[in-house]
Each structure stands twice: as C-alpha cells, then as structure tokens.
Image (cartoon, coloured by chain):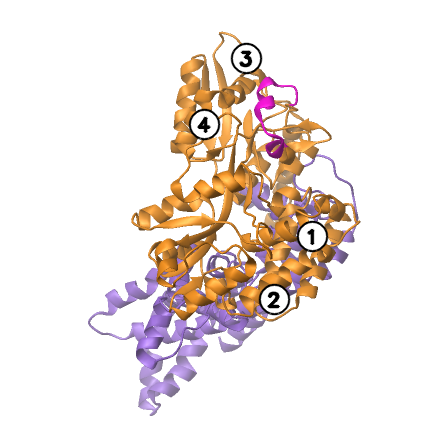
Amino acid sequence: MKLLRSFQYQLFLVPILLFYTVFTIYPLIRSFFFSLTNFNGYSKQYDFVGLANYVKLFKDSAIVSGISYTLFYAIATTILTTIFAIILALILDRNFFTRNIHRAIFFFPSIPSGLILAYVWGFILSPIGSGVMNNLLHGLFGVGPQPWLSDPLLAKLSTILVAVWAGAGWHAVLYLAFLQGIPKDYYEAAAIDGATRWRQTWHITLPLLAPAMTVSVMLLLTGGLKVFEIPFALTKGGPGFETHTITQVIVLRGISEVQFGLASAMSIVFFLIVLVLTYFQVSVMQRREEKIQ
Amino acid sequence: MKKHSFKMLIVMLMTTLLVSACGSNANTNDGKVGSDGASGDKKIKLSFLSWNNETEMKPVIDGFTAKYPNITIDFQTAPPVKDYIAKLQTMLLSNSATDVFIMAAENRNELIDGGYALDLTGQPFMAQMTDASKGMFTRDGKTYAFSQAGWVGGIYYNEELFEQAGITSEPKTWQEFIDASLKLEAAGIVPMYDNSGDISIILSALVASMTVSQNPDYDNQLFAGQASFGDGWLEPLKLWKEGLVDNQLVTSNMIGLTGDQIVNEFAIGNVAMIQGGPWNIPAIEQANPELKFKMMAVPGPEAGQEYYTGAPNVGFAVNSHSENKEAALKFLEYLATPEGLEQFEQGTGQIITIPGYESKVHPALETAYKEGLLAGKFYLPMVSWPRHQEALRNQLVISVQDLLVGKGTEDEVMQAMDQKLKEMESN
C-alpha cells in the first residue's frame, strides 16, 4: 500500500524528469561525445580524435586566461556581494519610515537583464572625458579621465563592480527573509547580559544566517563561474584576453572559430570545475551550518 | 522506503534517457517533409532567411510577389552577423533551413564544404556579376552565391573641423595624414577615435597598398605556407604603430568605447575622424543632419597608393536540399533584373555593383564609390583569406589590443598570427 502511494507521488515527477533529461542530461552527454571528435559545427562528416581536444585546450592561452579571470571574478563577486548583502539586510531590517521603498530600490537592479545593466554601465564608465563617471570624478576631485574599461586591471574591477551592484540587492532580500526568522528572545537575552549591538550581530545574527549563507554563496559562486553577459557587454572580453570568461572562450572557439569539438571539450572541463568547486563549497558550509545548530 | 524511491528515480531517468536518445536518432535519420515543389501555377511557399530586416527587403519582396503571384515568401530574418550565422547553422544542422539564405564571408567555407549551397555557375543571372564580386563565393571554378551590391569603407572626416585646423586638402601620403592629425590635436580637436574592436580599416588599407598591390598573390601564398604574416603585415603594422600609436593618436584608453559611442561623438562634432562604412550614415544623419562629412581613402606611404576597404555584399544562396529550387532560382533571377536591383537599393540603401547600373550614392561616399569601389582599389582581409577568417580576425584583434596596452611587440603579433594559422590548418 505504502509502495503504491509513494509510486503515485513519484509519477508526478515524470514530466519534469523528462524535461530535465531532454534539455540538460542529453545535451551534456552529446557534448561529451562531440568533445572526442573534430566536429566543426557544420559538416555532417567528422572523425574521432580521442582526447586530443583535451590536450589542446590546456595549451590554449585564451582558456588559461579565461579560467584565471573567471575564478577571480567568481570569488571576488561572491565575497563582496555577500558582505554588502548582509550589511544591507541588517540595515533594511530596522524599522524606519521609508523602509519598504528602500527595499524596493535596492532590489530593483536584479530585475532587468544583466545585458541591459552592463550596457548602461558601459556608458557610465566610458573612458573618454565626457563619460559620466569621468565627468563626475573630474568635477569632484579634478582627476583626469580613467580608462575604466580598457586598462587590464581596471576593466576586471569594473566588471566586478557592476556585478556586485546588480546582485547585492537580491541577496540582501534573501538574507532579510532569514533575519525575520531569528527569534527576538536571543537579542533580548543578550541585551540583558550587556552585549553591545555589534557583539549581538557578530555572535547571534551571523551564525544564525548560516543556512542563508550556504544557499547565497552557492548561487553566487555558480553564477559567477557561469557568467557571460556582464563582462561581454561591458568590455567584449578586452583588452586582449583580459576579461574573457570561460563561457566567452567556449563561444569564441566553438561558434566563431568553428571548432565545435574543442569547445565541447572546454565545456566538459568547465562542468567538472564547477561541480568540484560547488560540491566542496556546499559541503564545507553545510558542516558549518550543522556545527552552529 | 528511501531505497525504493531512489530506485524508481533511476529507472525513470534511464527510461527517459533511452526515449530521448531514440527520439533524436529518429529525427536525424528522417527525410525532409515533402511539399509540392513543382513550378508553374501551383502555389509555392518560398522560405527565405534574410540578412536585412523586413522593412529593408519590402520593396524587393513586394516586387517579386507582384511578378509571380503564385509564390508567397515566408520571410524570416536574423540580425547580422554572429546571430545570423548561428541561426543559419542551427537550421542547417536540423535540416530545417530555408530555401534561400545568405552566404557571408564568415560562413562561406562551411556552407560550400558542407554541400549546403547549390552550385549556381551556369545560371544566366550569374553572368552579370563582376569577377571581383564572384571571387568570394567561388571554389574550384564553381560559384555558389549571387551578390549584387558592395560596400566601401574608409575614413570619415568632419570637413568643418578640418577647415578649423587649417587643413585644406585630403592627405595624399601617410606622412601628410599623420601631420594632419597632429595639426588637429594642436588646434584642440580630438583627431580620431578607434576602439580596436575589429581589424582596423587603416591597417587593412596599409596592407593593401604596401603588400597586396605589389604582390596580388600574397594571400594565396600565405595560406599555401609559402609566406608568413610577417612578410606581408609587419611593415604596415610598424607604420601604423609608429604613426598612430606612438603619437598617442590611437590609445589603449579608447578600447572601452563602443562603436555607437564613437559614431555619436563624430556626429556631434567631438572628433574629427572615424573609420567606417555606408552603414554608419543613417546613424550619423539621425544624430546630426547638418554634419558636413566625407569619406576619404587611407593614404599609403607614397602618393597614389591610397586604398579603401570594401567587399562584395553578402550573397544570396539556394539551399541544395530545397524542395523549391526553381522558385528559389526565380527569386535570385529577379534580384538581378533592373527593377529588382532598384528595389534592393531603395530598401537597403546599399551600393549596386552590377555593371550597367548607376547607383545613387550618398554625397559623402561619391569619391569612395568612384575611385574605390568601381576602381577595385579596396581590400578586406576577411574576404581575401580563403579559410579561418573568423579565427584569424579574432586573433588579430586580441593581439593588436595587447600591443596597444603594451603587452607585446609587433613581432609578437606576427608570431601569434602565424601560430594561429598553423593551429587552424592542422585541424
């Protein structure tokens, strides 16, 4: 009886399983298959080349640069967004008159597509004197025009700036939701014991936000590793290969340069990197969660 | 309990996997869906994936359907360049490509090699194409696409700003060009913006005047392994770097500018020169209809060696697996008639290169049209390179950007290009 009941429930899973298999599992397997060939994306004729693509890709300067920039971007945006999101959540949790409007304002950047935001920021960070940011800096501090999007280091920092600006609000709302769930008695007890605001936050709030942190950091990390549109729209990957993300290199090699097999090999390697990093991160943070509970 | 549900999940996953695998195999082995492809009075639906949007193609489509009322056009479009290439590629791989599609410099090799384009060599309308137009679409003596237009690119300059700086005539040598730019700078005018986001028009033209005009076979030698990039590109690159980069006329700061921003700055008179082609004119005129500007050629080291960039326009090709080949050929034939040419020019604003047709060219492009396009004094690496154009183009852009930020030398750029060519050839 119980078996039949649970089977009935599982039947509901079939549609979504089908969808998932067709659109996620099957392309993944096909990609792995293509990565072992020299398929160029057009011709119906292609041959098996075994692991040649994998050997080739580690010698490719574009992918090496892509991996290092993407890791830098993912880790930097994760850390900075988490810090800003928690601070924002703490502020927006307080009771003040325009609280709801402020929550809406900070949440807003996560609504439009990353592409649109990046184009607008590209305009603001324009490297010539008449660009918005340069104009502002010149007016306030008398500083000359900065090459926000063309200097190797500044370009990387600009992409991180835009990403943090866009993501902080959304994650702040996530933390806000968890903040509501922390019982007020803990704070009262701590206040009676004479703990300052700061110590309360550090010893009560942050540990109890651990579940939210696990989810948020995982989303930020995977999102940061898979990113394409923000760096591409801001700098087109320039100057040189400096702000090429892994995804952009895959698109470059696979579609523009018609080396579909090589790009498939890159995507498989990419998939493994993301898998390992995420597994590592989630298990570490879940252990931390349990320790705190 | 947990064990059971887990097993169920695995079973279901396996089933769905099997089903999808079988399903897709069946799809790829499937033939094309039949349709009534006979010519004559039967109603025919001709599908067309267009490079230009619906508004631009409207005059031609209307004219064609008026002439052949039994043929309706299923008009589909994708914006050039990368989006179009990707969409067409997907359609071809899934056997759902349109009857007529566009062959561009970027995908011509793949389309011809893959057998996707019909051989048009014997067709009567092909005789109207000039040899310069045919070259790009020909392989082993067979031509696979019809192109009736061309474009010419060069340096747009603001006539009023030139007057302001005391420049009275277009520079005729490279040194005069650099001197004119420095004069503009001295007069407080920004001489040029170049975001190095694509192969520089100036660099291409220099390669034409310094290498290709002396040795027309250079690109073939390059791809046959008999010459290197250094042989043909090093001297032009050095000249470009010493003239523009060392004089701070083109800087790494400009890399962050978008093409739209550059065109806009030119239109409102903030910069004296930009590189561009006919496609920039609508944007310039919309931003500032009063602007007095003209296109000039890129001067070579000596007088009389100036060159433009340019190429035949993308070509119309017929799907070799199409069920409506006759109707498709009729469409191409219509494009070659005087009405077809006029309607195409009217809708898209492009310059017709079919001999015997006098194209109405924008006043800014008149010199460029006569002395550049019609005289054959134009060069575009993407068209001259027989293979791997995209890969080489990307590599050149990256290497030049590295050169600009000081990360490499001219020799290293040449090495990177040679290596890229070797890598692509070994595939």
> Image point 51% across, 42% down: which residue?
B152
From the rendered image, report the letter of the chain displayed in purple: A
Q: Mark 4 or 3 closer to N-term?
A: 3
Circles 2, 3 touching at the beta carbon (< 8 Å): no
Disc number lying in front (4 or 2): 2
State whether residue B3 appears in this view.
Answer: no
Determine whether, in the image, residue A2 is placed left or right of residue A45: left
Disc number lying in front (1 or 3): 3
Q: How far apart are marks 2 and 3 (CA)?
A: 58 Å
Q: What element carries label 4?
A: strand
* Amino acid type, callout 3: Asp
Which quadrant of the structure image shows residue A93?
bottom left
* Amino acid type, callout 4: Phe
Crowding near pointer 3: few (<14 within 10 Å), some, many (20+)? few
Towards the viewer: A235 or A108? A235
Residue furthest top as drawn: B41
Q: Residue B12 appears at what percent x and percent y?
A: 61, 41
Residue tagged by mark 3?
A: B36
Q: Is mark 2 on a helix, strand or loop?
A: helix
Determine whether, in the image, residue B316 is placed left or right of residue A265: left
For the residues beneath circles 1 and 3, the answer to whether they share a chain is: no
Q: Residue B254 appears at what percent x and percent y?
A: 47, 64
Disc number lying in front (4 or 3): 4
Q: How far apart are marks 2 and 1 (CA)?
A: 30 Å
Crowding near pointer 2: few (<14 within 10 Å), some, many (20+)? many
Residue tagged by mark 2?
A: B403
Residue tagged by mark 1?
A: A265
**Chain for disc number 1:** A
Circles 4, 1 touching at the beta carbon (< 8 Å): no
* Amino acid type, callout 2: Leu
Q: What element carries label 3?
A: loop
State whether residue B240 appears in this view.
Answer: yes
